[in-house]
Image (cartoon, rainbow, N blue to C red):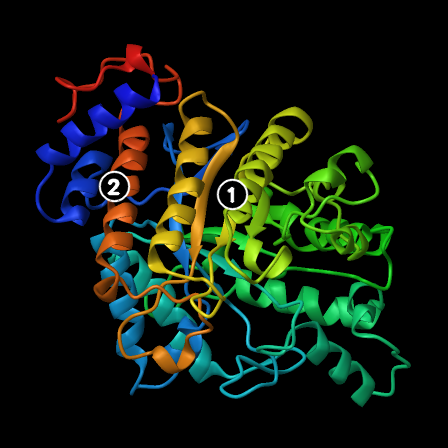
Amino acid sequence: MDDGRWDTTVEEVDNHLPSSSSQGVYELNDVEEDEWEMVTKKGNQFVINGQPFYVNGFNTYWLMVFAADQSTRGKVTEVFQQASSVGLTVCRTWAFNDGQWRALQKSPGVYDEDVFKLALDFVVSEAKKYKIRLILSLTNNWDAYGGKAQYVKWGKATGLNLTSDDDFFSHPTLRSYYKAHVKAVLNRVNTLTNITYKDDPTIFAWELMNEPRCTSDPSGDKLQVCCSSTLGFCINPIQDILIAEIGLEGFYGPSAPDRAQFNPNSYATQVGTDFIRNHQVLGVDFASVHIYADSWISQTISDSHIEFIKSWMEAHIEDAERYLGMPVVFTEFGVSSKDPGYNSSFRDTMINTVYKTLLNSTKRGGSGAGSLLWQLFPAGTDYMDDGYAIVLSNSPSTSNIISLHSTRVAIYNSMCSWKCKWGCKKKNPLEAIFYHDDL
């Protein structure tokens, strides 16, 4: 469908939906209340019970920490309520807090049951109430909430001779700590739902690490072995019911020198990651990419940011199709309000660029499988804002863009089953004005 016809059709559809965005999206999904199936993967697409599932969501990393305290737990519910009201269906958040304030893992293999029960169990059960699926990240490349630096501290405390935080990726003792944590979370039985995490359809996917980098080995070999080992040991035995991803930012490495032209800067080739090679590890189900033109190119806002975003996304969608044969999800994208030259109009343009680029892939059955805004906050949490927070109640234009995109994604997720590849004539509220033959 050409862009003009597509936009006109969506406007017609949007005019026919109820005033509540979430109501409209749920009607489009055509899923019974008691149905909550596991997301699976078929080729370069996600599916639920044979129907397409395109990811449309957001990040709110701090949900577990807020849920651990009764005074802030309500903010978790608020985030899910507000996300649901604009049709967002996936949230990425942390399933780790290592040795820090309100730690989940107090020391290797030792957990605070109250944090598990009152916090992470609550986050998972609350997400289900609002029909929001979760991507759970299992540790951090950065120091926040512990991450690989905390694992190294634990190792040093036992007398291990460790010289770098990157030893996390190669030292057998540290690897054993991490693998034990992965298994502990996968096998956790939620005290509120009585469902084991690895069996819960609410958990859409598992992420090995947030933004892994191994600068001590620019060749990427160390990280490659680490990913293969972790997926083989912890995930693969139950791979038939789990979707896993690494958590990469998407930088091209030594294995694809011709693709380095798409990197935002020369340093990106030296951080020890390799988009194509890393995602060829057995057990990886989809590719992840982040988008931060303001961090990677120039903090000052300019039109070049939009040009970069478009080419960055198109390159990764092409590679996911040509070399990987899997979906690619842009699991973080945003722009900081603290950047010189920032205004809300630029943010809206940036979000529109991401959404339109994805829809161009979606309309042809490509590998562009969705995106997650960084990041959604409820009102009253300004003190946590890193500049990227979007408070929907304070941002009507942005909220409208998200709602419209949610409607578009819901159309694709509800029109027909995977088997007919958009070719059936399934009856639904849109049949009179939206025809499969136009796709």
At 34% from the left and 17% from the top, the residue drawn is 2
Q: Mark 1 to mark 2: distance in Å? A: 19 Å
Please give left or right for residue 174 compared with residue 32 in the image. Answer: right
What's the residue type where badge 2 is placed? Leu
- Residue 372's place in the image compared with 147, above or below, is above
Instruction: Determine which quarter of the picture holds residue 207.
Output: bottom right
Q: Position of residue 202 (x, y in %)?
A: 38, 53
Mark closer to the chain start, 1 or 2: 1
At 25% from the left and 69% from the top, the residue drawn is 78
- Residue 72's place in the image compared with 432, above or below, is below
Please give left or right for residue 425 compared with residue 92 in the image. Answer: left
Residue on which disc 2 sits: 404
Residue on which disc 1 sits: 329
Q: Position of residue 44 (x, y in %)?
A: 54, 29
Q: Position of residue 277 (x, y in %)?
A: 76, 40
Report if residue 286 is visible in the image.
Answer: no
Badge 2 marks a residue whose secondary structure is helix
Image quarter where the N terminus lies is top left
